[in-house]
Image (cartoon, rainbow, N blue to C red):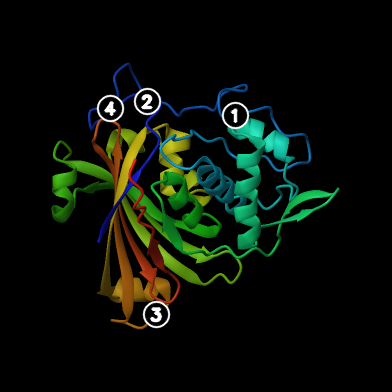
Amino acid sequence: MSVPRQGPTGSGAAAVGCDGPAGGAPERVAGPAGPEPGRGPAPAEGVFAPDSLALNRKLPLWYQVSQSLRASILGRPQDASARLPTEERLAAHYGVSVLTMRQALKELETEGLISRHRRRGTFIEPHARRVRPVRLLGSVDTIVAQQSGERTTVLGHGPAAVPADLAAHFPDCAEVTAYRRLRRDAVTGEPTDWAENYVRPDVAARLDAADLGRWPMTKVLRDAVGVPISRITDTVDARLADPETAGLLGVPLLSPVLHVTGVTYDTDDRVVDVALIRYRGDRFSFSVTVDTHRS
């Protein structure tokens, strides 16, 4: 089953290619110094500071905001404040109405990620469940949220030949940069999945592997490197655990695992990353919502 996910198509870093972006040596993209559309005033000191969001007008705004805030909450540092800004400040931060913000917060409250108290404010639940099924409505932030909140160990990275079965995705590359990562449940420490990412070398030159310890690859590519992601296509199939997968995930040899191949495209329709992810069959569920509404 292949599932395309549409990402924001706004401005970003220069288009990428194996020969590198035009205009000199690549560099990491720094965040903006002040407010901009979709990014309101900074939260007060001692209040949780969520990530910014580029809104896609083709998707429900409350849904995009809830996905982005969920990703921020699940990927928060250990010392982050548990108190959220007020509805008004959050609405200004995301560039949406207070009613939209209220609907997004209601979604997170229903999921048990936050609790709301009259006169006291809104707080992140300290023991909020961090592993949730994927619900796809077309947002890249959905994938970021699903993969956030886990402890990630970078097992290794470096240049590698393009695997034969991925050559069609990298027709102009003789070599890519490979990253190997193991993710564990943040509470129990139990392995949940392990991944191999094959990234175009000019994009990898701007990628700090240390970021992968905190954020999923999708977020690192979009927010830290500045790749303008247009879409991601997932192909999901069931496989049997090989010796390496069985050892890393702590499951019996030849037990069922869910294998996901995720192909990430930039706005020039070039593949920038191919992810091969093996999920424990008892720790992952995949749900797709198909909207039959016709515009």
Q: Residue at x 52, y 36 (%)?
A: 53
Picture quadrant of residue 187: bottom right
Residue for badge 2: 26
Callout 1 amino acid:
Arg
Front residue of 207 and 130 = 130
Q: Position of residue 131 (x, y in %)?
A: 53, 65
User: Callout 1: helix, strand or loop?
Assistant: loop
> Which residue is the site of mark 3?
251
Crowding near the residue tagged with mark 4, few <14, some 14–19, many ≥20 C-alpha atoms within 10 Å: some
Instruction: Check residue 39 in the rendering and tell me which mark sits there, or answer none.
Output: 1
Picture residue at 35% right of the left edge, 76% below the top? 246
- Confirm or deny contact between disc 3 and disc 1 (CB under 8 A): no
Reading the chain from its start, which is encountered first: label 3 or label 1? Answer: 1
| Gap between marks 2 and 4 measured at Cα | 7 Å
291, 203: nearer the viewer: 291
Q: Which tag, 3 or 4, sits closer to the chain's start?
A: 4
Q: Are marks 2 and 4 in contact (CB under 8 Å)?
A: yes
Calculate the distance from the C-alpha at mark 1 to the C-alpha at mark 4: 30 Å
Left or right of residue 242: residue 63: right
Left or right of residue 122: residue 5:
left
Dots 3 and 4: beta carbons under 8 Å? no
| Marks 3/4: CA–CA distance | 41 Å
For label 1, the crowd category at 10 Å Cα-Cα, with few meaning under 14, some 14 to 19 and many 20 or more, is: many
How many numbered marks have been drawn onto this rendered protein structure? 4
3 or 2: tag closer to the N-terminus: 2
Quadrant location of the N terminus in the rendered image: bottom left
Q: Mark 4 points at which residue?
A: 20
Query: Mark 1 against mark 4, which lies toward the viewer?
Result: 1
